[in-house]
Each structure stands twice: as C-alpha cells, then as structure tokens.
Amino acid sequence: KDHHVITNFTPIDFIKYNYSKNIFNNKYYDKSNINILYLGTLGLSHEFDSFINTLNNYDCFNLNIVGEGLSKEKIINKIEAGIYKNTTINDYTTNFNEIINYYLKTDFCLIILKDLNIFKTVIPSKLFEYSFFKKPILYFGPKNEASELINKYKLGICAHDSIQLKNIFYSVKTNFDDSNLS
C-alpha cells in the first residue's frame, strides 16, 4: 500500500491509431510558441532543475509535464513559486484520447536523465514511444546508447550539458530545420 506502479509501454491503441491516421508527422511549428512534452515518471533520475532553469531564459518555450513520481511535489512547488516558468504539470493518465491530445499539441518530446554513470548504459523506453509517434526528441542527459541512437537515426537533438542545451534552445528558436529528422 506504500507503492504506486506506473506502467511504461505503448498501448496497442496507439499502434492502431498511428497506422490508420498519419497525424504525427508535424514538421512545422510556430517558433514563437514551441511546445515540449515530457510524459513519464517524475523520479530522482531526472534533471529537471537544470533543464527548466535553462528553458526559463526563452519565452517561446512551453514545457508540459505529464506524470507521477517522487519529484512531482517539488516540481509543483517550483511552478507555484514562479521558479519554473512556462511549465505546466498534469497527472499521469492511461486515457488514450488524453495522451493523443498531449502528442498533438507538442513540437518536441523530452527525454531527460541526470549525468550519472548508471545512466550511461540505458535506453529509456520513451525513446521508442516518441520515435514511433514521429515527434522530434529533445534529449538532455549523459552520452549513452540512447543519445547515440537519437543521433544515428536522426530522431532528434541531444545536449549533454547546460551550454549545449542553451545552444539547442537558441537554434530551435531561431533557425532549426527538422526536415532532416526521420
């Protein structure tokens, strides 16, 4: 009774929907209103502070967080205190229509990990879900197999530190061309 299980998978409904309608191939976005989605666990392994503090320097980005986990209250408190700007948080859901709407409203999907040795050999499962939905991935974390896959298959863009992240935000805001992404 002290545990809460959050599933981490792509439901068959997504697969059926994706093959019946090709709605996730949005290659164009409004550079004055760029939406980033993080959908998943809000745990201790995620580096939200550094990411959002860098994001706060740009008014054109909006971060929508959907999930549950140990860090949720901390994130909510920082949003309410005005420390995290342009950031909203929503409860985790398994409702197909709600999840589809989150994807429809987003330009980039976020994968975020702390720069710890343990994460240098992991591939977060959300990489497969995000790429399945043909959404460009914004990766912030250590160099690892996941970032290698993102770069190799042109699934998105990767930053391994705050300076690289700042450069990516600037590039996305000003002249990013995602037509070369798969």
Image: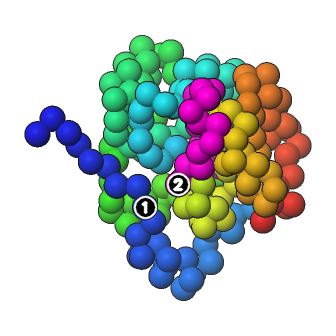
Q: Earlier in the sequence, mark 2 or mark 1?
A: 1
Chosen colour scheme: rainbow
Q: Say which quarter of the image contains residue 12.
A: bottom left
Q: How many marks?
A: 2
Can residue 27 be seen in this snapshot? yes
Q: For residue 8: magenta? A: no
Q: Which residues are magenta?
A: 108-126
Q: Which mark is residue 63?
A: none
Q: Say which quarter of the image contains residue 24.
A: bottom right
Residue 144, image x, y percentages? 70, 41
Under mark 1, the amino acid is Phe
The kind of secondary structure element at disc 1 is loop
In the figure, is residue 85 to the left or right of 32? left
Tell me which residue sits at (27%, 48%) in the image. 5
Q: Which mark is residue 9?
A: 1
Tell me if residue 47 comes above or below residue 181 in the rendering: above
Can residue 169 be seen in this snapshot? no
Q: For residue 124: magenta? A: yes
Towards the viewer: 37 or 150: 150
Q: Which residue is mark 2?
A: 125
Q: In which quadrant will I find the C terminus?
A: bottom right
Estimate how packed mark 1 is, as few (under 14), some (14 to 19) or many (20 or more) residues with alpha carbons within 10 Å: few
Q: In which quadrant will I find the N terminus?
A: top left
Towards the viewer: 25 or 32: 25
Under mark 2, the amino acid is Ser
Tell me which residue sits at (68%, 33%) in the image. 142
